[in-house]
Amino acid sequence: MEKKVIVSNKLPVAGPYSLAVEANGLIFISGQLPINPSTGEIVMDIRQAARQILMNLQTLLEENGLSMNNIVKTTIFLKDMNDFTAVNEIYAGFFTALPPARSTIEVSALPKGVPLEIEAVAVRNS
């Protein structure tokens, strides 16, 4: 198996992990928090937070020759399942055709007190 670390010049890494790792054409993207990469500001409003995370995912993919269409699976971690509808509305705007498989899980806490985190798996077209 060949493993390659995927990097970004535009997004920060806040710990001992890779933003993403590619193995055999699959790209495993670490959970993204709603952090504005330009300012370092943490976005707490649920709709703006969802949008920021998805824009960060889009940035990472585009920097590496991919798009949101390459995502085949996402996992959304929500602090409050009552935010599901708001997140779903923003999410739908990023996946207008052939949306990926998805799981949504309510959790008791997330890093930096954020309201949600999203991780993804993408596939590189051969």
Image (tube, rainbow, N blue to C red):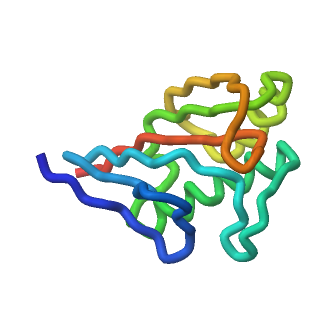
**What residue appears at the point 83 percent right and 30 percent down from the top-left corner?**
83
Q: Nearer the viewer, residue 104 or 125?
A: 104
Left or right: 23 as drawn, with respect to 21: left
Closer to the camera in the image, 89 or 23: 23
Horizontal and vertical percent position of residue 35 = 70, 60
Identify the residue at the far left of this view.
1
Dividing the picture into quadrants, the one containing residue 28 is top left
Residue at horizontal 80 percent and vertical 27 percent from the top: 80
Query: Does residue 87 appear left or right of residue 10 in this picture?
Result: right
In the picture shown, does residue 63 fall above or below 29?
Answer: below
Q: Residue at x 48, y 48 (%)?
A: 30
Question: Which residue is pictured at 55% across the width and 74% down the height?
Answer: 10
Of 56 and 13, nearer the camera is 13
Judged left or right of residue 78, residue 26 is: left
Task: Please say if 39 is above or below 57.
Answer: below
Q: Is residue 40 above or below residue 123?
A: below
- Counting every numbered tag in the picture gives 0
Give percent across and percent down for residue 112. Answer: 72, 50
